[in-house]
Image: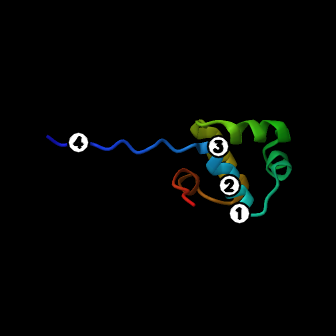
């Protein structure tokens, strides 16, 4: 019998925040690019799941691909 090891789910918000910090971009810069408040960006970064549309927009604002955020691993 084959046992599948479940990969821990990635925390998309944390990935966004860490990638943003690595790129040296502040939350308010991302917020301005997306027409959102800095508080909304903070809330996105605290969320374990981020919908695809939002993820795509944030990735574009950071100048990276959605896949780069999804597969980000320190």
Q: Nearer the viewer, residue 2 or 50?
A: 2
Image mark for residue 3: 4
Q: Nearer the viewer, mark 4 or mark 3?
A: 4
Q: Are marks 3 and 2 in contact (CB under 8 Å)?
A: no
Compared across the picture, whether 42 is left or right of 10 comes to right
Tag 1 secondary structure = helix
Q: Which comes before the other along the chain, label 2 or label 4?
A: 4
- Look at 52% across and 45% down and name the residue there: 10
Tag 4 secondary structure = loop
Which residue is tagged 3? 13
Image mark for residue 34: none
Q: Position of residue 35 (x, y in %)?
A: 83, 41
Tag 2 secondary structure = helix
Mark 1–mark 4 Cα distance, whole angstroms, equals 36 Å
Q: Residue furthest left?
A: 1
- Look at 23% across and 42% down and name the residue there: 3
- Look at 51% across and 54% down and name the residue there: 71
26 above or below 10? below
Which residue is tagged 1? 22
Mark 2–mark 4 Cα distance, whole angstroms, equals 32 Å
Q: Which comes before the other along the chain, label 3 or label 1?
A: 3
Tag 3 secondary structure = helix
């Amino acid at each position: 019998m084959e046992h599948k090891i479940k990969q821990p789910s990635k925390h998309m918000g944390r990935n966004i925040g860490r990638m943003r910090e690595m790129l040296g971009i502040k939350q308010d810069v991302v917020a301005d690019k997306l027409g959102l408040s800095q508080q909304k960006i903070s809330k996105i970064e605290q969320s374990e799941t981020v919908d695809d549309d939002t993820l795509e927009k944030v990735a574009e604002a950071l100048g990276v691909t959605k896949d780069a955020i999804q597969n980000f691993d320190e």
